[in-house]
Each structure stands twice: as C-alpha cells, then as structure tokens.
Amino acid sequence: MALKNKVQSIVVSWWRKNPLLLSTSRTLNTSATGYDNQILKSPPLVSLDFPDVWTSSSTNYNPPSTHKLGSDEKEIARVIDGKQIAEEIISAVGVEVRRMKKTIGEVPGLGVILVGERRDSLTYVRNKMKACEEAGFKFDLTQFSDKCNEDEVIDAIMRFNTDPSFHGILVQLPLPQHLNEEKILGVLRLEKDVDGFHPMNMGHLAMRGREPLFIPCTPKGCVELLIRSGVEIMGKNAVVIGRSNIVGLPVSLLLQRHNATVSVVNESTSNPEEITREADIVVSAVGIPNLVRGDWIKPGAVVVDVGTHPVEEEGGCEEGGYRLIGDVCFEEASRVASSITPVPGGVGPMTVAMLLCNTLQSAARKYNFV
C-alpha cells in the first residue's frame, strides 16, 4: 500500500509538470498583447462579463397570485414529467452497462468531489450516487469541509485523473468563495469532463459542423425533455432567461444548434417581460423564485424551469423542512402555457440522467465499445 501511494504521488507530480497533458485542461492563455486595445475601440470581452446580479426586489420570495380559478378557467398546461423520463433513460443506461460488463468486463466510473455541506449540493450528490448505483456504475465520493484549501481539492481531482477506472469527474458546484473555481476545474482532464464545461466543449457546441465531446448535462436534459415531449424546436422563437456558463449560455447555444431563433434575457435587459412573451419556448435558469409570472408567458408556449430555490416551510417535502420552487410561478404559468416542467421533478432528474449518459459515453469511447 505504501509503494502504491508513493507511485501515485509521483504520477500526480509528473502530471502537474507535463505541459502536454496540461494543455488538455481548462486553463487557456487568453491574455492579449495589447495591440487591439491600442488600435480598436472595442474593449476586451472579459471586461464586458458583468456578474448576473438581479435587482434586490427580484430576489425576494414573491408568492403566487391568490387569484382563484373561475368556473370557466382551468390549468391547461401539460406537466412534463422529468422524473419519469429520467428513470427511463437511466434504465436504458443500466442495460448498456450490463452489456459492457458482460462483453469486456468493465463498467463506467464516476468520481465526485463535494466541498462543504450546502443542503442543495448534498441532495444533488445523493441523487447522483443513487442513480449510479441503479445503473451499475462505479462511484466514488470525495468530500471536504468548507475550510479545505485548493491543493486538497486539486489532489483529489488528480487522483481521479490518473485512475483509469474513472471515466468521468464531477466537482459539485458552487464551491466556497475562498476557492478559485477556474483554477480547480482547470486541472480536470478534457476526456473526463463529463459536465461539459471545458472551453473546447463550449467552442464546439457553438460552432456549426463541430461536435463537443460532452454537452453540458442540464442543457442537454432540457432539450431531451423537449424532444421526448414532442415539442418542435426548429424555427421556433426561444427565450433563455439567464446567461450563466452552467446553463444559460450552453442551453442558448444548444437551442441554436437545433435551429431555434434564440434571445437571451439577462439582468440588464430593460424589457424582459415583453421579450419573453414573444417566445414559443421559455427556458429560465437564474435561481430567483417566482421571477417569471403568468403574464410573461405567451398563450400556448412551452416553459422549462431550471431554477431551484428552497423555501422554508414547516413539514416541507424535502429534508430539513423546506420545499423547492422554481424561477417560474407554476400556479400562474400553468394557466397560460401549453406544457411546463415542475420543480421539483422536472429538469433536476434529467440533469442526473444526462450525467450518466455522458459518463457512459466516455467509457465507451475509451474502450471502443459499441
């Protein structure tokens, strides 16, 4: 065991010093020479990356309207059952895993790193662990306190990087503020980046004629829900509310690849309600409870609610006495939309299912398993 640990330490040290291997990481040298700024009036793009800080009035919990449905009113929206669809996908993944094990004696492996004890992160990781067990994956969780340092987290990633039995690595986000997220994620091997956030994956997602190694899990799950629910995407007007690197940006790119006409609403948009009302498909991913009201929705639109927000409630359905609500006021939007995803039970289970699909894809790619 001592020899094994010594060898592993040497391998990790060599990995960090090897520029060819590090070139496949998230760390890209984007520093400019300065000539552009001397010649052009356009500022560097990173200087335009304002944080998504919505107004304080929007971040407070705003309960649904108390309006009661009249005799001539009804909830017309079809509820898209993400939980059921995800279970079907995970079952199909399990069939492939058993076939892989029978054929070549290998199974996909997923390594997860969790820092701190955020209750939402704990719930997400627990769901991922359960799904991996159901599908027959190898699963390993490395957990740190929120007081840990960056080197501890990086060492854990390195161990998964160099272990051939792990085909996917996931660092549960968000990380505590004292940790440099970009630096930590920068050491993750491209071919194990099953979250799909590597700049090369994002670039290939944005470019026609290119195929990313992995499509980010939540956007992939949103589009899969639409397709499996019979929602036509091509030629439709889609509005994405929020522009985070995790959901907003990649889901807007993915919808464009599916030939939708896409608009993105951000915290600086002066007329978000008017823009959203033009959409055939609405995807909201800002994490602000009940931001999207019924009067934001065009009659007959399809609404995909990615946001999750815990609301304290005695006897709540989640552990700890709280319930989850989304960005979209479900009670109001369901009277207007044709289809809508619930929170919970909509996009969340699909994110887990897509993570398993990406990890299976990574293992199949490594073993040339078809």
Image (spheres, helix red, strand yellow):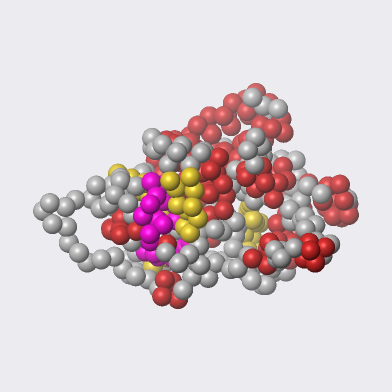
Quarter holding the C terminus is top right
User: Which residue sits at x=25%, y=53%?
Assistant: 335
Residue 359 versus residue 166: which sits nearer the camera?
359
Does the magenta portion include 101?
A: no
Q: Position of residue 314 (x, y in %)?
A: 33, 69
Q: Is residue 35 above or below residue 278?
A: below
Q: Position of residue 212 (x, y in %)?
A: 65, 40
User: Which residue sits at x=75%, y=63%?
Assistant: 40
The answer to which quarter of the image holds residue 228 is top left
Q: Position of residue 127 (x, y in %)?
A: 50, 51
Residue 124 versus residue 304: which sits nearer the camera?
304
What is the number of callouts on the image? 0
Q: Position of residue 260 (x, y in %)?
A: 48, 42
Is residue 243 visible in the rendered image? The answer is yes
Residue 20 versus residue 251: which sits nearer the camera?
251
Residues drawn in magenta: 273-292
Magenta segment, prevailing SS (helix, strand or loop): loop
